[in-house]
């Protein structure tokens, strides 16, 4: 169905009814769909395990490039992994690690050129040892977060904080600094609950060309703190030991309030509730507060968190949603986005985002359940092969969600000012951020400082912003200047730290200078991999070794490959020119203008 040819367009009342009906259909599908086609292996090869490509979950990297390698290896044991690394080191081949379900938006999985080697942890997915008395669990790096949670629960233990999506692997979480939400204890980063790391790196001739290192805070503190967030440049993480906690339960209540005092609340709320977070709907002037606290394990309740957008969805329904948003973009239909956003957010809130009191139905707050049932979800990975009738909504094999993500951590001391800057932008154009709310709003999670060299530097609030991405990289987006300004305010006015795995290129330009321990990290990297076999042009750029991550060319600002400095970096033929920000005048954003300015820009 192609909405641009619908006779309902041009008749606002009927169009609004049509939009409402199709959103209700899609939400009904979202709630009730139960099975799914699993994601395919992100590594594809022309012949057996040779002549291979790799992609991320969404089917496209920020620069739209294709990542290739001569071959892929699938070790099933650490011994096999050592042999693979040794052979590649002896041959001088570049290597990068891939995982089972997905990869970061950024190009951390890519190797340079076409002669390299992908090493997949798909079959390094076993539990090595669990010790209930010592409260430790050792797993291989290809174990998913879902497996980790389940294995811990078997011996009465719990990982206290983790990302909300359970399709990540242990190695992937370590590589990018993945986290949950908390200011309590030592914070919400998964890597800060690790006590030992086994890593396989290139070795000398006397090492047999590969070396297994066992790292811990007590024996090798510098190397350990480098490996906790490694970006994959130190070698292949083989095994990880976690220090866990006794199983506990959580009591969760979602409340929706207006955002009039949100700046003040955002600074203090995380001190009051251990697992607090927010879902901000700035165009609606509303915030969903997550009041989420630890309770005793014997507290009554068997709640389950099964986040609705992470459930499988009918591919046809997802295609309708995408077609609708493409049409809204084509016709600059801000009203349509706002209507859809309001309906979606109110429905998700009314259905408690997928929370149930007993795994079946929601009967009311608080929802109380064991940590292993309340922390993370991702049931669209549960699979019966159904020929893509159903799938995860972002599966690149269907016409599904296609988006950018901009994710950064703003120091807690600056959060109120940053929120007020966003509010100032909304006052200028109240409809400008409805597009974010079509992607569930701005998710905000608490993080704390970490001893990891490339971990968080201070107490902060992490802002996770998801928004429409065009299939054509030269197609500008509705109100894209507002989102670009938010991005630049965070990164440059407030010196926010970008998430290593979820950003556009511009966020990483000069990022290594924001980490006081970056030089110490680079010393460990030089020691572990002196010839840079696990490094790439991309990792060298983001680590400040050589070059920078931005790509300057016509239209580069539309995809976040650069910050515009001239009109050609936007889309002058389509009326988008490079202009200063509206609130943060130092920003340079692609703004839709009309009249003589466009004519002059195109003629020049």
Image: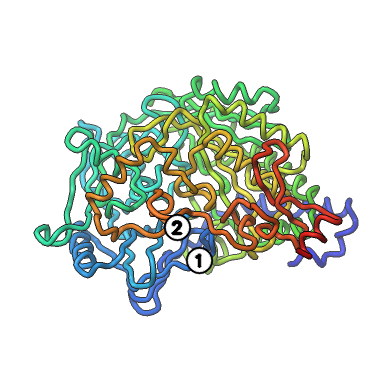
Residue 192, given in percent of the width and then of the height, sits at 33, 35
Q: Left or right? Give the position of 574 relative to 377.
A: right
Q: Indicate whether 165 appears above or below 463.
A: below
Q: Secondary structure at mark 2?
A: loop
For label 1, the crowd category at 10 Å Cα-Cα, with few meaning under 14, some 14 to 19 and many 20 or more, is few
Residue 150, given in percent of the width and then of the height, sits at 35, 43
For label 2, the crowd category at 10 Å Cα-Cα, with few meaning under 14, some 14 to 19 and many 20 or more, is many
Q: Left or right? Give the position of 518 relative to 553.
A: left
Q: Are marks 2 and 1 in contact (CB under 8 Å)?
A: yes
Q: Indicate whether 561 appears above or below 440.
A: below
Colour setting: rainbow
To which residue does mark 2 refer?
Answer: 107
Q: Nearer the viewer, residue 572 or 300?
A: 572
Identify the residue shown where x is 39% and y is 48%. 543
Identify the residue shown where x is 55% and y is 23%. 267
Q: Secondary structure at mark 1?
A: loop
Q: Nearer the viewer, residue 47 or 563?
A: 563
Can you tell which quarter of the image residue 158 is in? top left
Q: Nearer the viewer, residue 103 or 505?
A: 505
Residue 207, given in percent of the width and then of the height, sits at 11, 57
Residue 373 in sight in this render: no
Q: Earlier in the sequence, mark 2 or mark 1?
A: 1
To which residue does mark 1 refer?
Answer: 65
Identify the residue shown where x is 40% and y is 30%. 449
Q: Left or right? Give the position of 266 relative to 205.
A: right
């Amino acid at each position: 169905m192609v909405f641009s040819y619908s006779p309902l367009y041009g008749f606002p009342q009927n169009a609004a009814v049509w939009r409402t009906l199709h959103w209700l259909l899609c939400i009904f599908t979202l709630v009730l769909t139960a099975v799914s086609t699993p994601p395919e292996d992100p590594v594809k090869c022309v012949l057996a395990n040779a002549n291979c490509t790799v992609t991320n979950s969404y089917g496209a990297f920020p620069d739209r490039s294709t990542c290739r390698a001569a071959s892929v290896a699938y070790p099933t044991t650490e011994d096999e992994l050592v042999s693979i690394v040794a052979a590649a080191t002896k041959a001088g081949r570049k290597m990068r690690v891939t995982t089972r379900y997905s990869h970061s938006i950024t190009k951390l999985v890519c190797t340079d050129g076409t002669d390299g080697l992908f090493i997949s942890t798909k079959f390094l997915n076993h539990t090595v040892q669990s010790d209930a008395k010592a409260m430790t669990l050792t797993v291989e790096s290809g174990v998913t977060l879902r497996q980790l949670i389940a294995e811990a629960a078997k011996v009465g233990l719990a990982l206290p904080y983790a990302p909300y999506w359970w399709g990540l692997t242990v190695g992937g979480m370590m590589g990018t600094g993945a986290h949950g939400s908390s200011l309590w204890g030592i914070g919400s980063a998964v890597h800060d609950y690790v006590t030992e790391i086994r890593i396989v790196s290139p070795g000398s001739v006397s090492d047999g060309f590969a070396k297994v290192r066992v790292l811990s805070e007590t024996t090798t503190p510098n190397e350990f703190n480098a490996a906790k967030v490694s970006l994959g440049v130190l070698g292949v993480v083989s095994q990880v030991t976690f220090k866990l906690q006794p199983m506990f339960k959580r009591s969760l209540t979602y409340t929706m309030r207006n955002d009039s005092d949100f700046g003040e609340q955002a600074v203090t709320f995380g001190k009051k509730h251990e697992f607090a977070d927010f879902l901000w709907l700035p165009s609606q002037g509303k915030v969903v507060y997550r009041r989420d606290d630890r309770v005793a394990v014997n507290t009554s309740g068997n709640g389950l968190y099964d986040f609705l957008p992470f459930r499988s969805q009918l591919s046809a329904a997802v295609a309708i949603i995408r077609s609708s948003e493409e049409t809204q973009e084509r016709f600059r239909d801000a009203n349509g986005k706002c209507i859809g956003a309001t309906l979606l957010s109110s429905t998700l809130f009314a259905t408690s985002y997928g929370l149930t009191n007993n795994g079946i139905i929601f009967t009311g707050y608080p929802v109380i359940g064991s940590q292993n049932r309340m922390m993370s979800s991702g049931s669209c990975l549960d699979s019966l092969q159904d020929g893509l009738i159903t799938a995860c909504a972002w599966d690149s094999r269907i016409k599904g969600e296609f988006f950018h993500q901009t994710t950064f951590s703003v120091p807690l001391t600056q959060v109120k000012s940053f929120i007020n800057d966003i509010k100032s932008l909304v006052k200028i154009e109240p409809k400008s951020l409805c597009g974010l709310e079509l992607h569930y709003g701005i998710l905000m999670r608490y993080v704390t400082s970490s001893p990891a060299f490339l971990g968080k530097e201070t107490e902060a609030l992490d802002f996770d912003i998801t928004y429409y991405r065009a299939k054509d990289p030269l197609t500008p987006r509705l109100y894209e200047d507002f989102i670009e300004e938010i991005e630049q305010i965070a990164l440059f006015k407030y010196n926010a730290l970008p998430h290593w795995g979820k950003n556009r290129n511009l966020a990483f330009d000069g990022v290594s200078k924001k980490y006081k321990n970056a030089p110490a990290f680079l010393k460990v990297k030089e020691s572990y991999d002196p010839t840079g076999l696990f490094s790439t042009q991309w990792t060298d750029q983001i680590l400040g070794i050589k070059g920078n991550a931005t790509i300057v060319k016509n239209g580069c600002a539309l995809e976040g490959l650069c910050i515009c400095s001239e009109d050609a970096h936007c889309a002058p033929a389509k009326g988008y020119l490079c202009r200063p920000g509206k609130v943060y005048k130092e920003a340079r954003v692609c703004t839709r203008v009309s009249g003589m300015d466009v004519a002059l820009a195109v003629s020049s």
